[in-house]
Amino acid sequence: MWRITVLSLVVGVGVWVAHVAIESAFFSGGPFLDWRILNPSGLHVLYALPEILLVFGITLVWGLAYRRKMIRDISELKFEKEGLAEEYSIRTTLIGALPYPTMMVRRDRTVLFANKVAQEMGAVVGGQCWEDFGQCQFISDEDKACLNQHSDRPPGWTHCTFCLADEALRDSKNAIAPEVHAFGRIWETYWIPVNKDVFLHFSLDITDRKKAEKKLETESRMRETLLDGIPGCIALILKKSTREIVASNRFAKELGAVPGQVCFKTCAMRDDACPFCLAPELWKTDQPQRLEVEYRGTWYEGIWVPLSEDLYVHYIFDITERKQAEEALRDSEERYRRLFAAESDAILVFDAETREFVDVNPAAVSLYGYTREEFLDLKHWDITAEPEESDEIIQHMEVGDVARISVRYHRKKDGALFPVEISGSMFMLEGRQVLCGVIRDITDRKKAEEKATRHLAEMKFLSTTAMEFVDLQPETDVYELIGRRLKELVGDPIVVISSSDETNSKVIVRAILGVGKRFEAALKVLGRNPVGMSFPILESFLHQTASGKLVKLSEGIHHYTREKISKTTAKLIEKILGLGDMYSMQFFRGGTMFAIATIMMRKGDKLENPALVETYINHASVLLQNRRAEEQIAASLKEKEVLLREIHHRVKNNMQVIVSLLRIHARRTHEAGLKRIFDECRDRINAMSLIHEALYESEDVARIDFKAYLTMLCRNLSQAYDVSGKGITLTVERSNVALDIDQGIAVGMVISELVSNAFKHAFTKGKGGSVSLSLSGLEGEEVELIVQDDGKGLPPEIDIHNSTSIGLQLVVATITRELGGSIEVEREGGTRFVIRFICPNPQQRETPCALQKS
């Protein structure tokens, strides 16, 4: 208070002094300050006292008022200072405690405050934020370039390249740089204005968050990729509480189900909750849920699978086709069940692992004799008679092969075995592998096959033996052959083949087969070998065995040997040989018995195939009939051949007599013309005589060996015309054919005429020459005869077809009429006759000719 009073007094005195000074200067013209007025006795003092008091009072009042205000202001400032200090302390404490770099910075980028983290990163209080950070030794060159731009920054540049402080102060709102890469980390940087000149600057390290976001994004992409990879399926990832879509695949997006929306809002079914949603049940059980729903003619399958505490994946499949397939499968199964029950073959279904029967059809129950309940207690090896082979079949079926087994043997309930045909495969039934076998009883078929096989073997045997009979050589012992083949049919029994004479009064044993080592003991009892022995035939035996069937001999061997062997001896032989039943049958054909077959069975054996034996004996009867006929024909042919040779011999002799008579007459006549006629007739008859001589000397009386014939003919002609004394040679160059008697006589006549003419007219007297013959077969049935000489040649005026010569007329007529051939003449270098004719087809003639090429 006293300070205000003194101050007021001083102010009042000061105001008065100022007033006096002004007055002295302006009004009295004296000096600026006349100290005389300070004299107390002066009038100025009295005059100035009220003014001083007024100023003093005013100053005092103002001072008191100002004092009160100052007191109030000081109180307020003190209170405010205390609050600001506390707030500042709180702020610095909070900023300093932040785990990320934080600073208080002025507009000019001067750092007012920096927490410990910022200071460690280079921030200095009082320094420039961007320069301080730029000097940090831990910052890479790339980060420094980002902070201060180095020497490339423009003039007046005072902040980092990513600084947003100016925008924050200008707009008075927070500024954020969401992603700044510095110090090898990723930062989210904030600029928050405190006032118009100061801002709070801090950076959050979001490296881990960015990595997590990137990982989450990668997982999201993977999730969407996985969802998109599910074919034909709508897939959603939803939140538990809100049903909000977190992710969806492309099929769901095509329907409008995109992340951020509620699933049932985009559902094609309705606008409220899905009618088949099982999400609540999913969280109750924490197990995947599945539901099938039909909606508007389409079947859907929904699957809900939990992913985490708040997420689940929801799949929606269009299963209409599957439902249709299942319906078709049910229909098929129903049809299968009906077919299964109606199938005539037995069907067995059993477990692939345990081999226990799962199901059987009624046909299996009927075939095996078990009831269905009994079957279900059995295993597959309980019905098979070949367990090892059955296991091998099952192994093939287990690797996917379809087993088809033609013959196996199974066992019925009563133990009876029977052949079956099996076809089977493996498939899945109610979640387990089963084997299905279709069993067919082939007993009847096996019997039919065996019968057919046996019949085929019998037919083959009969055809083989028939061909054997056809190709049989004359020297073959037919009885031995028949007995051997009959032994092949009956097997172990003894076979005896006996022939009969023409009167059927007795039989002769021709062959015995299959007697074995005991036969020697039987021979001692019998006293001789029975082969070749003859036995009289009883009339009753002939009548009994002539039926074309095997007849059982009630009395054994003694049945037809009673005239030669006693009953006791016969029984002893049967005992030694161990004989049992005996059968006999005639080889009977056309009312004639040719032989008798006797089959002696071993004791205890039975004749297995009597029908085949009977058939074979009947076939063999044909052989014996043919053999007897052939023997008769051969004997007849032999007799006729002898007679024919005798005829040819006598004809030849008679012709030789005629030749001799002609030769005698020719010698006795003195007329040259008549003598020539006798000689020509002699030559012609001699040629025919030689034909008959060649025939009766030939092995085949129907054909002429022309090589031998021409040799004799040429020799006779050479001798008749004495060609050796004239220097003429006659040669036969080729003769490789054989002709019958008709063509042989004609060809012989032609050769005789042409060779005789050559000897008589072809050569000049005193000069020799040569004549040659050639008779050969050409292709096909054509025969060529060539007669040529190297003489003076046939005169050109002679036409062989219109000749007056009897010899040429005879030659042409014989060739054209009898042989049906042609004749040509070549006149250069002598005379050459070329004659061709056809040897007729043997099937068109009773006495065929044959071309035999040597």
Image: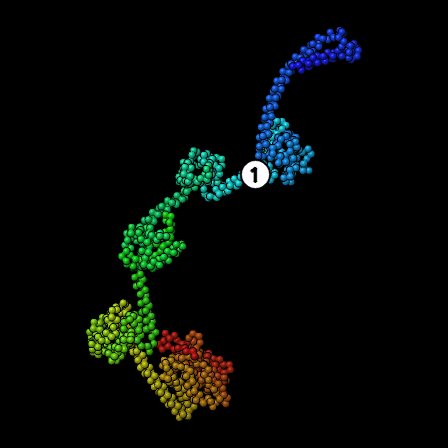
Q: Position of residue 644 (x, y in %)?
A: 33, 82
- For this rendering, which residue is in front, 433 or 11? 11
Task: Determine the residue located farthest toward the front in the rendered image.
Answer: 2
Q: Is residue 57 visible?
A: yes
Which element carries disc 1, helix, strand or loop? Answer: helix
Residue ID for mark 1: 207
Q: Amino acid type of disc 1? A: Thr
Describe residue 63's horizontal placement relative to residue 98 as left or right: right
> Mark 1 packing: few (<14 Cα in 10 Å), some, or many (20+)?
some
Q: Position of residue 837 (x, y in %)?
A: 42, 77
Q: Position of residue 423 (x, y in %)?
A: 35, 56
- Give the image quarter of residue 72: top right
Q: Position of residue 327 (x, y in %)?
A: 37, 44
Visual colour scheme: rainbow
- Give the image quarter of residue 392: bottom left
Which residue is located at x 44 percent, y 39 percent? 306
Which residue is located at x 33 percent, y 85 percent? 646
Count of picture labels = 1
Describe residue 347's horizontal placement relative to residue 116 as left or right: left
- For this rendering, which residue is in front, 48 or 212? 48
Which residue is located at x 32 percent, y 81 percent? 638
Describe residue 461's horizontal placement relative to residue 749 as left or right: left
Q: Is residue 673 visible?
A: no
- Compared with 590, 114 (above or below) is above
- Compared with 224, 608 (above or below) is below
- Compared with 64, 81 (above or below) is below
Describe residue 23's horizontal placement relative to residue 202 as left or right: right
- Give the image quarter of residue 54: top right
